[in-house]
Structure formats: C-alpha cells, structure tokens
Image (cartoon, rainbow, N blue to C red):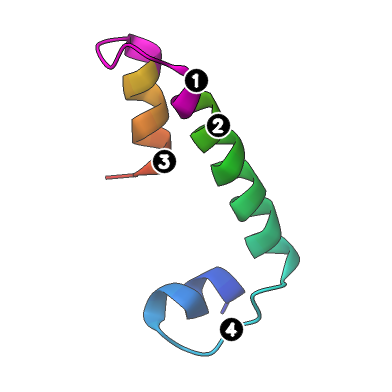
Amino acid sequence: MTEFQKMISGQEYDCLASELLSLRAQQQRLNRQLNQIIDQENTEYSQLCQQLIPP
C-alpha cells in the first residue's frame, strides 16, 4: 500500500515520502497558476480546477 493510499484511508503514513512530496509540489504549482488567473470564466481556470479537484 502506498503512502498516498494510507493517507486517504486514514492510516498512519510518512508525510515525507517522496511520492507525497512530489504530489504536494505539483498541487502547489497548480495553485499558483490558478491564483494568477483573474477571469473565472477562462477555460484554463476550469482545467486547473479539474486537475486540483479530481472527480
């Protein structure tokens, strides 16, 4: 079971695991991009939201 799966299921996990660190960095990058977009009607804004909050 990966550290991500442990985290999602509520088990103890290593927050410094490389897979979680890379996911955190990716989410931070997407958040920065999202915060730079002013127009919420922009299609790029919608795409970034979908990446940040998967269905």
Q: Report the side of 50 relative to 35 (left or right).
A: left
- Quarter location, residue 54: top left
- x, y percentage for residue 27? 54, 44
- x, y percentage for residue 30? 53, 34
Q: Earlier along the polypeptide chain: callout 3 or callout 2?
A: 2
Q: Report the side of 4 relative to 54 (left or right).
A: right
Amino acid type of disc 4?
Tyr
Quadrant (top left, top right, bottom left, bottom right) of the C terminus: top left
Q: Which residue has dot 2 on it? A: 32
- x, y percentage for residue 3? 59, 75
Quadrant (top left, top right, bottom left, bottom right) of the N terminus: bottom right
Q: Which residue has dot 1 on it? A: 36
Q: Residue at image x 48%, y 76%? A: 7
Q: Which mark is residue 17?
A: none
Amino acid type of disc 2?
Arg
- Which residue occupies the foreground of this view, 8 or 30? 30
Amino acid type of disc 3?
Leu
Which residues are drawn in magenta? Answer: 34-44
Asked whether residue 2 appears in the rendered view, the answer is no
Distance CA(mark 4)–CA(mark 3)? 22 Å
Is residue 39 part of the magenta span, yes or no?
yes
Q: Secondary structure at mark 4?
A: loop
Q: Report the side of 2 relative to 51 (left or right).
A: right
Q: Report the side of 12 relative to 50 (left or right).
A: right
Q: Which mark is residue 13?
A: 4
Mark 2 vs 4: CB contact within 8 A: no
Is residue 42 part of the magenta span, yes or no?
yes
Q: Secondary structure at mark 2?
A: helix
Distance CA(mark 2)–CA(mark 4)? 27 Å
Q: Which residue has dot 3 on it? A: 52
Q: Earlier along the polypeptide chain: callout 3 or callout 1?
A: 1
